Amino acid sequence: MTKILVTGATGTVGSLVVSSLVGAGRDVRALVREPGRAALPTGVEVARGDLSSPQTLESALDGVDSVYLMWPGLPVDPRVVEVIAKRARHVVYLSADVTDLDDDEPATIFHQDIERLIRKSGASWTFVRAIDFATNTLGWVDQIRQGVVRWPYGQAARSLIHERDIADVAVHALTTEGHYGARYVITGPESITHAEQVRIIGEAVGREVRWEDLPVETARRQLVAAWGNPAFVEARLEAWRAFVDSPERVTDTVQRLLGRPARTFRSWAQDHADDFR
Ligand SMILES: NC(=O)c1ccc[n+]([C@@H]2O[C@H](COP(=O)([O-])OP(=O)(O)OC[C@H]3O[C@@H](n4cnc5c(N)ncnc54)[C@H](OP(=O)(O)O)[C@@H]3O)[C@@H](O)[C@H]2O)c1
């Protein structure tokens, strides 16, 4: 049986990729930085490795056929992709909704650099380009508990995706044929406004939660203080502003690949109700 290396195996998507592969009886090796601290399902082989240090990956890649690769926002190191491509036949990369770049175009986000490196690496590849995760709304936990969410652009309509759908698509790409060279943009099944997301979370938790539109200037100040990256904050604000006029797109990729619709935001909120209580 072919061995699959899962990076980010303790993370939101990677942990689901691991459990799903193990459940399907696959031979899984999990890459973790601290094996002693990683809680992984029985049957998973654990390998120590660090994506910021390519030489630590060599033994973890021994005998591996395919890799689920996520990039934890580190500075991009082309040697990591080289090491992986030298040993693995197929790389399934968790990316974002990015555009392809030519050789000499500067990247605006690290996913574009990693994708470009993978495309040129010689390995077969599949890009799972996920729209923003529904788990990002966990950033509202404190406000939800207090009964009011103050955030900008209440009418921005997003097609957030359930992390289980991302993992399901990645596992599908890792375990079935026909995905080489595919760039799968995956979204939730509908776009839902920020204010509506909050109402749905409130219903799942069993309490009324109000929405209050935060003035953009106040939001900018607060988000820069919280996230520490003015360019990222500006990009987010601009995207949300645009989603007020044009709701974020919805793709049918999950349905096409998995033969069932993507999970709704309501089902995500029900799955995570305890996280908000
Ligand atoms: N959030 C979104 O809306 C969104 C949308 C599209 C794409 N993405 C992308 O999704 C990815 C994040 O995926 P996720 O949410 O599943 O992960 P996550 O929950 O953020 O977990 C991060 C994982 O990275 C591992 N990690 C951190 N530093 C590492 C290192 N130096 N070497 C090896 N492993 C390391 C951690 O493992 P240990 O700490 O156990 O070692 C952990 O398993 C990012 O690339 C992000 O850009 C996110």
Image (cartoon, helix red, strand yellow):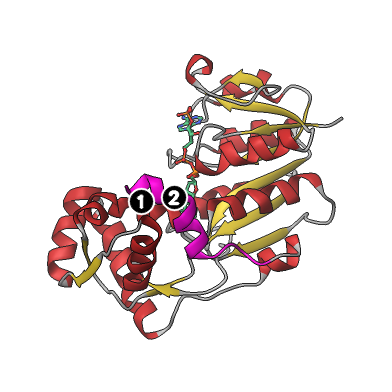
Q: Residue at x 61, y 72 (%)?
A: 251
**What kind of element bears circle 1?**
helix
Residue 186, by quadrant, is bottom right
- Ligand 1 under 8 Å from disc 1 Cβ: no
Tell whether 156 sits left or right of 29: left
Give the image location of residue 177, x and y in percent: 85, 52
Dot 1 alpha-carbon crowd within 10 angstroms: few under 14, some 14 to 19, many 20 or more: some
Residues at circles 1 and 2 in contact by the CB criterion of under 8 Å: yes
Q: Nearer the viewer, mark 1 or mark 2?
A: 2
Give the image location of residue 252, x and y in percent: 66, 72
Residue 198, by quadrant, is bottom left
Is 186 above or below relative to 142? Answer: below
Give the image location of residue 132, x and y in percent: 46, 59
- Residue type at numbered disc 2: His
**What kind of element bears circle 2?**
loop
Could you tell which of marks 1 and 2 lies nearer the N-terminus? 1
> Magenta segment range?
261-277
- Give the numbered dot on residue 138: 1
The residue beneath circle 2 is 272
Q: Residue at x 56, y 74 (%)?
A: 250
